[in-house]
Amino acid sequence: MTTTSPTALITGASAGLGRALATALAERGWTLVLDARGADRLAEVATGLARVTTVEAVAGSVTDRAHRAELAAAVRFHGPLDLLVHNASELGGSPQPRLVDLDPQTFETVLQTNVVAPAALTRQLLPDLVAAHGTVLAISSDAAVEHYEGWGAYAASKAALDHLVGTFAAEQPALRWYAVDPGDMRTAMHQAAFPGEDISDRPLPESVVPALLRLLDTAPPSGRYRASEYAVREVLA
Ligand SMILES: NC(=O)c1ccc[n+]([C@@H]2O[C@H](COP(=O)([O-])OP(=O)(O)OC[C@H]3O[C@@H](n4cnc5c(N)ncnc54)[C@H](OP(=O)(O)O)[C@@H]3O)[C@@H](O)[C@H]2O)c1
């Protein structure tokens, strides 16, 4: 089936930033394919958004090859892919271990989730993205460019994700490729990164969405952006 509304696939869409972005795109009439591991919470989000747009929820882990194939099939049912959002992410423990204490299995899971899966999913959906002259948006982190005690695995994965995006941009210049650092957000992942801390002063993920939408609307050159800087630059323009 081919729909006239643009289509987005958002990974990790049952909570936090992924859910907030899915909600905003649904309000704009986008057709959505959504993923997360927890089927119940994902179905709840999809049912809510289905009141305003076409939504398909496909539960599973991005690290699972068969699940990625299901996601690709779901996308193809709706037509070319205008936007692929790599948002699902693995923190690597709570509290996060120092590198000297990082067990190889945890490191592998972080890399599989944050780097290998986005690369594989992108490769799989490249024809669908090309057909739509589409955009890939990978949610990065300041940890990709800073060095924080305990953040080694996650930081290395986000730096690698940034690099993947940049290399894809060099190899596929007809598409738009963005790695975006959203800044701190009051989410389950952030609470896991700061166990026991009061994170109520951190902004909600919904507050980052306008910058992401502005990025998509204005389509600047492919590259790495910080949501906060981009929002300010556009407000001042
Ligand atoms: N929060 C921050 O302060 C912050 C700062 C910088 C960057 N980021 C980045 O922002 C993005 C969103 O983070 P968030 O804070 O919004 O996270 P969150 O609230 O914890 O939500 C994570 C979402 O991803 C899903 N998910 C996790 N692992 C998955 C997997 N293997 N396969 C499919 N879905 C998976 C979760 O659902 P299930 O658990 O049911 O799978 C959930 O829907 C991430 O890329 C994160 O690295 C966050």
Image (cartoon, rainbow, N blue to C red):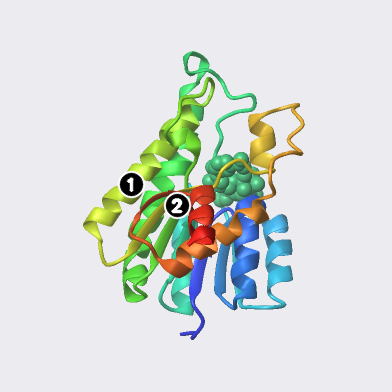
Report x, y in % for residue 217. Answer: 47, 69
Of all residues shown, which one is farthest toward the top? 100
Residue 80 placed where, x, y %?
Answer: 40, 76
Graded by Cα atoms within 10 Å as few (under 14), some (14 to 19) or many (20 or more), the crowding at tag 1 reads some
| Image coords of residue 205 (percent x, y) | 65, 51
State which quadrant residue 127 falls in: bottom left
Q: Is residue 23 visible?
A: yes
Residue 55 vertical position relative to residue 206 in the rendered view, above or below: below
- Residue 108 appears in view: no
Residue at the limit of the structure toward the front, as seen here: 236
- Asked whether 155 or 50 is in front, the reply is 155
The secondary structure type at the circle numbered 2 is strand
Q: Which residue bears the numbered disc 1? A: 164
**Percent x, y of residue 43:** 70, 63
Numbered circle sitting on residue 144: none
- Between the residue at mark 1 and the residue at mark 2, the CA separation in whole angstroms equals 10 Å
* Residue topped by disc 2: 138
Q: Quick check: marks 1 and 2 in contact, CB under 8 Å?
A: yes
Q: Specify whether 217 is left or right of 175.
A: right
